[in-house]
Image (cartoon, grey):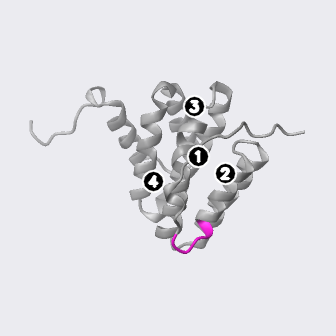
Amino acid sequence: ARGSPVPFWAMSLEQSFVKKLGELNASSLSIQTLSNWMSFNQSSSEVLSKTWSSEIQKAKPDRKITLLYLANDVIQQSRKKGNKYKEQIGKHLLPVFANLKQTVPDQTVLEKAARLCGIWTDRSIYDAPFIAKLHAALAAEHSAAGNESYSPSRPAEEPA
């Protein structure tokens, strides 16, 4: 029948992911469940990362931090499986952070995003120059940082 929802099994991976993102809530269980699903579908990390970027940028301000926490969980989990998401999501983080600054009036959300940068630094997820660009995107009044993306110049230093 016309207008009826598409059965889950008939959805493309991208459509399925958008649906799952829409159902995501801020609970640890919800974030970890979707993070595990993304890890299972790591061979599609490029399209899923691009979809995540698109969805977070058009999400309501109060949903953006939950979607950022999802990315954090996926990035950290993927370190054990080849860093595909680290690089793929990393390509989208500068525009996402610039979008946060431009669209989220709540300073606590920006502080939480900045705290993620600290975690990524402490755990050597991304290198210091890239983290500095993320901080600059959050601090900029009208950020031009959204035009850049993550490109690993060298692996992050291993902790001593």
Residue denoted by label 2? 130
Q: Nearer the viewer, residue 114 or 106?
A: 114
Considering only vertical position in the picture, is 106 above or below 17? below
> Measuring 51% from the left and 74% from the top, which residue is drawn there?
105
> Which quadrant holds residue 28?
top right
Q: Earlier in the sequence, mark 4 or mark 3?
A: 4
Q: Earlier in the sequence, mark 1 or mark 3?
A: 3
Say which element carries label 1.
loop
CB contact under 8 Å: marks 2 and 1:
yes
Q: Residues within 10 Å of mark 4 (few under 14, many from 20)?
A: many
Q: Quadrant of the C terminus?
A: top right
State which region is magenta. 138-142
Q: Earlier in the sequence, mark 4 or mark 2?
A: 4
> Measuring 63% from the left and 25% from the top, which residue is drawn there?
81
**Residue 84 at x, y = what percent?**
57, 31
Q: CA distance from mark 3 to mark 2?
A: 17 Å
Pair 3/2: label in front: 2
Q: Nearer the viewer, residue 19 or 133?
A: 133
Q: Earlier in the sequence, mark 3 or mark 2?
A: 3
Judged by its main secondary structure, the magenta piece is loop
Say what amino acid the circle numbered 2 marks.
Phe
Pair 1/4: label in front: 1
Quick check: 108 left or right of 44? right
Say what amino acid the circle numbered 4 marks.
Ile
Quick check: 40 left or right of 4? right
Q: Is residue 26 visible?
A: no
Q: Earlier in the sequence, mark 1 or mark 4?
A: 4
Residue denoted by label 4? 56
Say which element carries label 2.
helix
CB contact under 8 Å: marks 3 and 2:
no
Q: Is residue 124 visible?
A: yes
Residue denoted by label 3? 84
